[in-house]
Image (cartoon, rainbow, N blue to C red):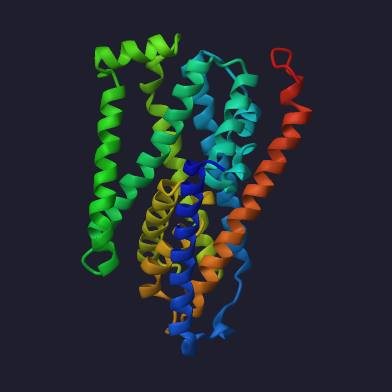
Amino acid sequence: MSKASALKLSLALLILLVAFGSIARYAIINSNSLDFSEIHIDWLFLGMAFLFQILTWIFFSFSWKIIIREAGNLKIGFTEAWIVLLLPQFAAYMPFRIESLIGRVWILKKIELSNANILIAMFRFELTLVFCALSASICWIGYYGKKIEILNKLFPLIFSLILLTVILILLLKDRVPLKIKNWFELKFPGLNWNCFRSPYLWFYQVLGWLASACMFWSLAVSLGWPSDFSAWVYGVGAYFAAKTLGFIAFVVPSGLGVIELVLLASLSPMSPSHSAAPILVLIAVFRIWQIGMDLLGSFAAWNLYHFSFSRKTNIPS
């Protein structure tokens, strides 16, 4: 193992140790108030969570459909876009998520997208995805930051990240400096800069995030959390912040530990009871749910690939 790989692995283990150590410490401190008797499952809201999960996949699949059409002037069907989104999804649980990126590159090559436009397509999807979550996170922290101390500490970090993302978008939307543009075109011939102009991508990315947020809070309500609108707004904001920081912490698999810690810190003040059980159950169930849905989505995409995608005449099996 190289020194760089060892350093990255050590950093990942440190983050996991700190995150789960903090969660364990919270559980131990509140062990006297752990009452799981109030936990119940509302199957209606659990079903709604699954419905919103499907909608999330649908909207993000349309995002990929638009990206590929504009980046490579290729028209693909919804099935192919679904495969591009979900087939590499479970590889995100590998350290540094490299396997997930490699898997997506492999699929995009199958649809005959050039190397240059694969780069621009993947960058565009990730950039818009993170920007939407960052925007929601900073609005949420700005509104609730004064009420919760931990949010005041997160505000400068989130604000800096969203400012950097805005700058990147402005640079890449008809304002790319000539020297940078020439360098990219030299290294990656055939780059299609026009693929940054469509508003439809942002529309589907926002819808995808809203569906994902509704999935999370439906799951929470199914475990006994409040269902009123103000609770939904707060819970959705916490979810956006957790997913954003989990995405940024790329050295840990799928934000493992980071997402749970942020949810614990932000949602524990609004726990539906004085017991620490609801928040601990929620973060545990959500991680299990996320792993299960990623497995389900990847399995469905794998079967679609074998029965549909690989049979296209312009795509080698």
Residue 143 left/right relative to 90: left
Q: Which residue is drawn at 47% across and 70% down?
A: 21
Q: Which residue is drawn at 57% across and 78% down?
A: 39
Q: Note whether 42 is above or below 290 in the view shown.
A: below
Q: Residue at x 42, y 39 (%)?
A: 129
Q: Which residue is drawn at 58% across and 31% down?
A: 102
* Residue 83 visible somewhere in the drawing: yes
User: What x and y, as percent, mark residue 152?
Assistant: 23, 62
Q: Which of 237 and 92 is in front in this view?
A: 92
Residue 70 left/right relative to 294: left
User: What x and y, as percent, mark residue 126?
Assistant: 44, 35
Quadrant containing the N terminus in the rendered view: top right
Q: Which of 49 and 131 is in front in this view?
A: 131
Q: How many numbered discs?
A: 0
Specify the quadrant of the image occupied by residue 178. top left
User: What x and y, as percent, mark residue 116?
Assistant: 48, 16
Q: Note whether 147 is above or below 214 in the view shown.
A: below
* Residue 224 visible somewhere in the drawing: no
Residue 95 left/right relative to 213: right
